[in-house]
Structure formats: C-alpha cells, structure tokens
Amino acid sequence: MMLKKLNTSLIVLLLCACQAQDPATKPAVTEGSESIEEKVIYGTDNRKDLYEVTSSLQRRLADSTVALIKASSLQDNGTVSRIISKTFRVSYGLCSTERFGEQENAAFCSGSLIAPDVIATAGHCIRSVSDCDATRFVFGYAVKTKGVLPQEVSTSEVYSCAEIIHTEVLSSGSDFALIRLDRPVPNHAVLSVRKRGAVKVGDPLVVIGHPVGLPTKVAAGAKVRSIQPAQHFVANLDTYGGNSGSAVFNSKTGVIEGILVRGDTDFVYQGSCAVSNRCKDTECRGEDVTRITRILPYL
C-alpha cells in the first residue's frame, strides 16, 4: 500500500533541519547542482540514547561528536549555556507512537572532532562565513541518564567557528566541510579516520549524530550496500535530517569511514500526524556517505 508523502510545508521544515542559512562569502567552496535529500529507518530502528549504549568503543566515539546548534538557540548564563528549543513532537507534528517525541531537538546538523581544533561535517551544513559565524559546535548534547533531558550544557563545551578550511557540495558526489574551531578541544579525543584503502560491501557500520536535531543518538547494525560511486558509498543507516555531517564509523575498528550526507524521505503521514518512513534493510535508495578520504588533502 502506498503511504502518502509529506505536504509542502513539512517538506520545507525537514530540509531546514539539515541545511544552513543563505550563503554569503564562500571561501574554499566547490558546488554543483544541489540535491540534498533526507534519510530513513532501515529494518529495525537501532537508534539509542547515550545512556543505553553498552559498548565502550561506541561511547568513546560519541564523546568526540558534536551538535551544530544555532547561536540564537543558546543562552550563555556564565558557566552553563541553556538550550532553547521545541520538542521533537511539536516541531514535526508527530504521532504519539513515534520514538523520542518528548525530547527537544535543538541541533540542525552533526559533526566530529578529527583534529585538536577541527570539526568535520557536511558541506551543506556550513556553506559560508555567515553560516559558520551563526553556528556553535556543542559537545555533550546527549541523554546521559535515563529521564534526564539535556536542557543545558557547560559553556566550556560550546565552541565557535574560527575558519572554514574547506566546504564542498556536489549533488551526487562528495559533500563535506572542515571547520577550525576558536580554540583547541582539551577533553575529547581526536577521532581516527581511514587514510588508505576503502570500505567493502557488507562492512559493519555505526553512525553517531543528531537525527532531526535530537540529543546524540548511536545507531549500529548497518552495513555498506554499495561502493560503486567514486566519492561516496551507500549504506542502510538509520538516519534523518540533522544527521547530516554525522561520522559513520567502522563498527569493528572505530575508524571513521565517511560523513553522512544524503538519503531517503524521513517521514510519511499516518492520518493527520507524521511517522518515520521505514524500509527493509535491502530496500529504498540507501544513505549516501562521503568517503572520509576526500577530506585528507585539506587536513
């Protein structure tokens, strides 16, 4: 049976969840015709809050991922910064059966620490100096204890943009940005990236980021489906808008294999409310992941 697609207003809202504002000056940017698509749940929904994650490797990896949050959504109160946002259920008009509806969704994209003061994210998340200036890079936006939702973070965990090293958006190719932070990050480990070789079909993956802007979600149980594109590979990752820029790790080694950038439609209507679009593991278009080796020339 065919499910109805989202109406126009909700599609606009979904796109805004993973795209930055209008571009201004564009340093070191390469663009093609834009086609930023959404993401989807494949098979079982594998998303977990941080407190549910038992793997020590996955917890270490999550500790070095960041939420991209608009500066206007943070209120600096000295040693702590309050996060200002609506709940996921209100923001997206969700059905009551949808997971994580009570959580606030402040982030618009995701990223990861790949040098002491450098964040990797999707190119369509940060296109311009004005985008970068309006963004804060926040560590620790996660549900660390059951029932305790993150409505504030330590101000020391909030970083600003010092420089766009490179940003690139190609419609069916690579999509990534490297951002230099305003200061080195002292208390989160630099993540390892693949420097040679390539993933293989069937390699196990885990993605860590902020689906639809929610606090950190860890989603394992995915695999590489296709390696045919030259600049990206395709996987059955459980991701949404807001996951754009998320690091996609090899589940066995913990090495970053790529950056999540594109995928299938997030939501469909069920009556008057929205639910997650679901596909079998081998169905739908799959999620596009820019190969992490694309960033190496700019590090």
Image: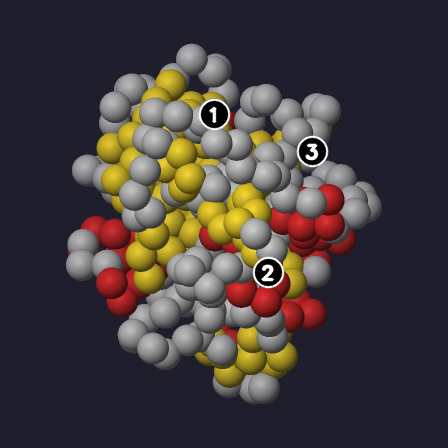
Which residue does the numbered mark 2 point to in the structure image?
93
Residue 275, position as x, y percentages in the image: 49, 51
Of the two numbered discs 1 and 2 on the same chain, state the one appearing first in sequence.
Answer: 2
* Amino acid type shown at disc 1: Arg
When the figure is inspected, residue 32 is found, relative to residue 20, above or below; the finding is above
Q: Residue at x 29, y 75 (%)?
A: 145
Left or right? Give the position of 119 relative to 194: right
Q: Alpha carbon of mark 1 to alpha carbon of mark 2: how far?
A: 25 Å
Residue 24, position as x, y percentages in the image: 81, 46
* Amino acid type shown at disc 3: Val
Which residue does the numbered mark 3 point to in the structure image?
29
Q: Alpha carbon of mark 3 to alpha carbon of mark 2: how far?
A: 35 Å
Helix, strand or loop status at disc 1: loop
Residue at the right extreme of this rendering? 24
Observer able to see residue 285: yes
Nearest to the eye among marks 3 and 2: give it: 2
Label 3: how many residues lie within 10 Å, few (<14), some (14-19) or many (20+)? some
- Determine which of the numbered discs, if any, sits on residue 285 in the image: 1
Helix, strand or loop status at disc 2: loop
Query: Quadrant of the rendered structure where residue 59 is?
Result: bottom left
Helix, strand or loop status at disc 3: strand
Residue 88, position as x, y percentages in the image: 53, 64
Left or right? Give the position of 211 relative to 13: left
Label 1: how many residues lie within 10 Å, few (<14), some (14-19) or many (20+)? some
Q: Residue at x 33, y 47 (%)?
A: 45
Residue 247 versus residue 177: which sits nearer the camera?
247
Q: Alpha carbon of mark 3 to alpha carbon of mark 1: how far?
A: 27 Å
Residue 116, position as x, y percentages in the image: 43, 53
